[in-house]
Image (spheres, rainbow, N blue to C red):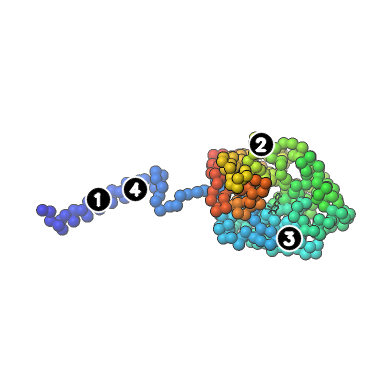
Amino acid sequence: MTHPVRGRTLAVLLLSLVIVALVAIGAFLPVGRWWPHPTEPPQSTSLRDAAGGRPLVGSAVAGDAESSALTDSAYRQVLATEFDLLTPENQMKWAAIHPERDRYDFAGADEVARFARENGQHLRGHALVWYGALPPWAKELGGRPCSEVRPVLRDHIRTVVGRYRGVVAEWDVANEVVDEQGRLRTDIDPVLRACGEPILVDAFRWAHEADPEAILYINDFDIERPGPKSDALEALIRRLKAKGAPVNGVGFQAHLRTDDPDLAAFPAQLRRFADLGLHVAVTEADVTVNMRSGAPAGGEAEKQANMFGALMRACRGEKACRSFTFWGFADTHSWTGSPTWGRGAGTPLDSKLRNKPAIDALTRTLTQNRPPR
Ligand code: XIL
């Protein structure tokens, strides 16, 4: 019969030996290399970290004069940790920031600017000359003589750009000024209707005077592929620059659909504008999916992932591509969120802030493609 005390001593000794051996082996093992460290949560790299600033990764911040997504703490958390660059989705448009001729309202824009400052993020300002989101008083300017409209635009640009001088890093000075046929939108844009193309030279000059450091963009959609619209935009930029307008960049909105033609021509489109000595950027990316049955149809999430991946690959591969902004990151806070005409859900996260396949495709694109030197 084994002596009980001696038996226990032997057991303790054996156990100690095993522990010492395990600790010794463990010291030579790179922890987590062969198996995940049990106390660490599964790692998921943010797009911002995967990109390392090439490009800056951004999102629109949902909100307007009446509401703000920044009241939603889960939304704030993702916005603060995943992005380098924020664009107020509507808060800097005329309707929100200049609701009456003699009254500016900076509340919504200031809220986004404060959030960006607290979280060390850059800001894109959007938009100074645009036919959309105009308050009624500004829409009426289209019927007025240029001599009346010009000082109004000058005051608007000086006031708004001046207020965010040193805070907004880049501005969409001209947004959607060319139509699908390549004509200047003098029909629906009151400022262009009153004053024509020369007012764009003024607009860029005034913005530059109000903040000499800001990078000034022309921004548009449907220029991801060649065609009359991007031809006209290039010709317009050449003319504006020849007249001394400080145009610094072209923004490709990239509001896409899964059934759009592929993006094989997009890298060359980026280069074509970069060749004019400009920055380029993806400024409003979303990719809507087929929702005719009320939910994304089979295979749509993968098509969406491929399209986001192709967009990011093109930007990552272009030295002049400064930033890549999603027009919202979650379906709950996106203009594509609720299905319209059978399409929707255009963001990379779902309404519960869970990753769609797009996130994996975007992350893979960034980790597998180095930015050019
Ligand atoms: C959209 C916003 O996302 C919506 O919330 C708003 O109701 C309408 O405008 N091109 C642009 C953006 O330049 O300003 C538009 O944003 C989308 C199309």
The picture quadrant where one finds residue 332 is bottom right
Q: Secondary structure at mark 4?
A: helix
Q: Residue furthest left?
A: 1
Q: Are marks 1 and 4 in contact (CB under 8 Å)?
A: no
Amino acid on which the number 1 mark rests in the picture: Leu
Q: Establish whether ligand 1 lies closer than 8 Å to the Cβ of label 2.
A: no
Label 1: which secondary element = helix
Outermost residue, front side: 293
Residue for point 75% across, 63% down:
104
Q: Disc 1 to disc 4, how far (Cα)? A: 14 Å
Q: Earlier in the sequence, mark 1 or mark 4?
A: 1
| Residue at 73% from the left image edge and 60% from the top image edge | 97
Residue 212 coordinates in the image, percent (x, y): 73, 53
Q: Residue at x 80, y 58 (%)?
A: 136
Q: Which residue is mark 2?
A: 261
The disc label shown at residue 97, or none: 3
Residue under pointer 1: 17
Camera-side mark, 3 or 2: 2
Q: Position of residue 46 (x, y in %)?
A: 54, 49
Q: What secondary structure is marked by label 2?
A: loop
Q: Does the residue at mark 3 contact the one at mark 4 (Cβ under 8 Å)?
A: no
Where does label 4 land, which residue? 26
Of labels 3 and 1, earlier in sequence is: 1
- Which is closer to the viewer, label 3 or label 1? 3
